[in-house]
Image (cartoon, rainbow, N blue to C red):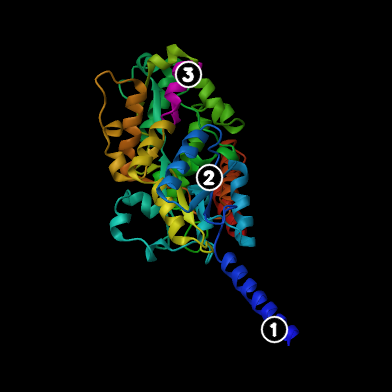
Amino acid sequence: MFYIVKWQRFRLFAIFGLILTFLISCTTLSPNLNTQEIKFWTIQLQPQFTNYFNQLITDFEADNPGLSVRWVDVSWSEMESKIESAILTETLPDVVNLNSSFAHLLTEPNTWLNLDTILSDSVKNEYLSNLWQASQINGKSFGIPWYATTNITIYNSQLFQQAGLEQPPKNYSELAEVAKQIKEKTDKYAFFISFLPEEFSEVLESFGKMGVTLIDVDGKAAFNTPTGQTVFKYWVDLYQDGLLPKEVLTKGIQAGIDLYQAGEIAMLFSGSEAIEAISENTPDIGQASEPVSQITGETGKKSMMLMNLAISSNTKLPDQALKFALFITNNQNQTAFTQETNVLPSITQTLENNYFQNLPSNASTQDKARIISANQMLKAEVLLPQVKNLNELKQIISQNLQAAMLAEKTVDQAIADAASEWDNL
């Protein structure tokens, strides 16, 4: 009888243990068993912003007893592959920082929470509508916009005066005319833009600005059109007419920065943060530099790069993960982050702050650049297509465009070959 009772008690303990194990496995716990842990990945924000995020996490944990955040920062070069691996192994963290270049990862089926099912319209409306749309796939919201960057044009006013130019160009048609006049009057180049495949984003964005759809809804090449041929010819003509440095085919963006700081080109297409670096590195060039809006085409489109936050569909803490993502992107925290990092916010209230809208009476060139960047945000778009093989697309168009620039192919042949290579891929 004693053995029977003992065995029954053992079975009860075993069953209780299995139930307890199941309950624990259904909840993400930190080493402190009373605390639920949110796993959070970002892209290359350490060590520059380590203190900011440590304080952010401390504030969140203080406001939410029983929750902790484990923050992991991943390098830019590794992030895409790590996310892809985590998707395959179902080991995604609860909250993931995605970049607009990685937006194709949002198309992975059943990977991310559909935010439309858990967020009210009033919450969505706190964000810039164009940024929220850029975080959607097929009309469904899988990302919360976090912060963005957008290029401006920085021009050397002294070189423009020497060339007899009063205003910098606003669009690509004016850019070609300005490039010709600067070359004729000063024997210098108007600008530098890289055609290397790995640094081809700016050239690729010019297709969208000039009205070219790169990829159709079926993923096939859509750029072999009369408008696409016009864009190919635009860049080919600039190069063959000697209006672009030969190094555009062999060197990257840093070469353009070096040439601008040396006074050898009249314009730089970069983020507003470049103004400060130019002023520090070459004070004379910095003093002559003025910021204006980025170059666009007939469409009037402006490009941007967007960072957003996505929540894993496998998270055991969906409500808590969403709460943390909304905390990161709220007005107070975006105000602090954007002023510390020189990026642009996704919350309308933050963008309407005096810091982004009103120039101080003693405005610096950096202040002017920030206001110009902020004003572009209302209509900025992610112009690079959201496709998995974006790097291959860059390489295919870059190589064929370079072949036309070097007269190894006609424009018609180069664009036809590019379209065929992409479709075969």
Residue with the mark numbered 2 = 42
Residue holding disc 1: 5
| 398, above or below 422, in the image | above
- Where, quadrant-wise, is the C terminus in this rendering? bottom right
In the image, 225 versus 123, the foreground residue is: 123
Mark 1 to mark 2 CA distance (whole Å): 55 Å
Residue 234 relative to residue 24: left or right:
left
Residue at screen point 56% across, 26% down? 255
Disc 2 crowd rating (10 Å Cα; few below 14, some 14-19, many 20+) is many
Q: Amino acid at mark 1?
A: Val
**Residue receiving disc 3:** 188
Left or right position of 367 against 64: left
Answer whether labels 1 and 2 touch (C-beta < 8 Å): no
- In the rendered view of the protein, which quadrant contains the N terminus? bottom right
Q: CA distance from mark 2 to mark 3?
A: 41 Å
Rendered residue at 60%/73% (across/down): 19
